[in-house]
Image: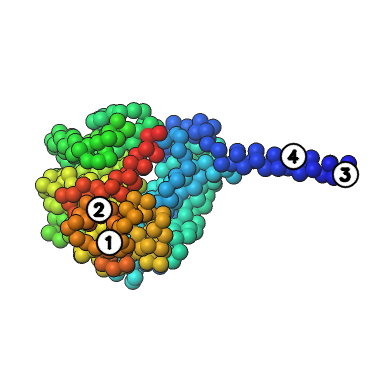
Amino acid sequence: MKDLFIFFIKLALLNSLVIITNSSFGQINYNEYFTENSMRIDYYHSGTDKSEFVMFKEIRKENYWGGTKTNLIDPFNYGNYRVRVYDSLSNRLIFTYGFCSLFEEWQFTDEAKISQKGFPESLIIPFPLKSIKLELQSRQFKDNSFITILSMYLNPDDVAINKEKTVSAEVKKIKYSNSPDKALDLVFIGDGYTKDEIQSFYSDVENISNYLFSLQPFNEQKNSINIWAVAAISDESGTDEPHNGIWKSTALNSNFNTFGSERYLTSSDFHSIRNYAGLAPCDQVCILVNTKTYGGGGIYNFWNITGAKNEYAKQVFAHELGHSLGALGDEYYTDEVATEDIYNKNTEPYQQNLTTLVDFDSKWKDLLNEDTPIPTPVKSKNFNTIGVYEGGGYQAKGIYRPYINCMMKSLGYDFCPVCQRTLKQVIEYHSK
């Protein structure tokens, strides 16, 4: 009798464990935890080449949550930073996403070795109904592990949450396919367009969007993508070109000559960018700069920026969107930026189009023909063959790419099948 009693106790405990496990890892009901708004946590990301810390600024409430309401736990694990949101009462993980930042790129510069600097950043999450615990974690170069660099409890009823509207701009739906929670929302913001040049901005958005939808996988996914245009008005036309002594007063404070690279077009004024992005449901910030000078930049789940009047603007935009949307890595390796080893060749990079062969099974090995040699020689017969070609991620040796030429290596080419697969997966994550 005693043994039978113990058996039923163990069975009850097992059933309880199953219930708890299913509850912890089952699909999260968005409406149980979040509202239709966004919460924006503004801070400054500071440090040196070997240190980093976060200085909190403020919390803002924004009108729209543009993200998915179904896929609340990010399955990709891309980016050097990740956000984790827990329900305070149950400690249940209810929302995550990954991203990269301009600060992490600065850490590889010579300036970072001798000085400390800070960059504005923001975390964007759906606005919670109840108190939450938020963690910001940083990926470690040595082993790809994460450490927590910011942890805080947030009360959605806190009277200090800023609800004021800081900017105004006309917002246009350029292409509307589905509700924001069922679509990837690309929000285009203009910089360096004066009041008299706004129609030119709208034309640039149309032209670049039409080009994007001519490419795989965007053409087959076009009914899962919304295009918004936010007409930020600048005092002056153009952008800063420090190497030419040109300085302009613009809405988003964009500039060339980032980290000493003449063609690297960026903006470190992230809080101003988010002020405009918050005027529409937003998954991706796409900045078009009113300049003929060649250049751009793209950072995963941060922003992408393109000089809109250059003859190569459409291709540059597509390349930079590969970075900002799909966390794809640069596949070129003979360039002025190739001054530092930004990849640890003893670990596998998270970028899906690059491998060190440390864990190639997690990359595109499933797409290779059985007789494809590893590494794969760069020969004309392999031009359209998925392989393992040495050279990528700014390094000629030890890092491999899947195609001889691809949009992520050279302008004038389509995205290769590996990049297409990655981008398609991300679009589907946002739209289903």
Question: Helix or strand or loop: what does disc 4 sit on?
Answer: helix
Label 4 with label 3: CB-CB less than 8 Å: no
Q: CA distance from mark 1 to mark 4?
A: 56 Å
The residue carrying pointer 3 sits among few (fewer than 14), some (14 to 19) or many (20 or more) residues within 10 Å by Cα, namely few
Q: Residue, x 13% and y 52% (percent of image)?
A: 293
Nearer-the-camera pick, 198 or 208: 208
**What residue sits right under mark 1 in the picture?**
376
Q: CA distance from mark 2 to mark 3?
A: 68 Å
Q: Is residue 103 above or below residue 428?
A: below
The residue carrying pointer 2 sits among few (fewer than 14), some (14 to 19) or many (20 or more) residues within 10 Å by Cα, namely some
Label 2 with label 3: CB-CB less than 8 Å: no
Nearer-the-camera pick, 260 or 426: 426
Q: Residue, x 84% and y 41% (percent of image)?
A: 5
Residue 12 tag number: 4
For discs 1 and 4, the disc positioned in front in the rendered view: 1
Residue 32 rendering spot, x and y as whole percentages:
54, 32
For discs 2 and 4, the disc positioned in front in the rendered view: 2
Tell me which numbered mark, 1 or 4, is placed earlier along the sequence: 4
Tell me which numbered mark, 1 or 2, is placed earlier along the sequence: 1
Q: Is residue 299 above or below residue 397?
A: above
Please name the amino acid that badge 1 sits on: Thr
Left or right of residue 61: residue 411 = left
Q: CA distance from mark 3 to mark 1?
A: 67 Å
For discs 4 and 3, the disc positioned in front in the rendered view: 3
The residue carrying pointer 1 sits among few (fewer than 14), some (14 to 19) or many (20 or more) residues within 10 Å by Cα, namely some
**What residue sits right under mark 2 in the picture?**
385
Residue 2 tag number: 3
Tell me which numbered mark, 3 or 1, is placed earlier along the sequence: 3
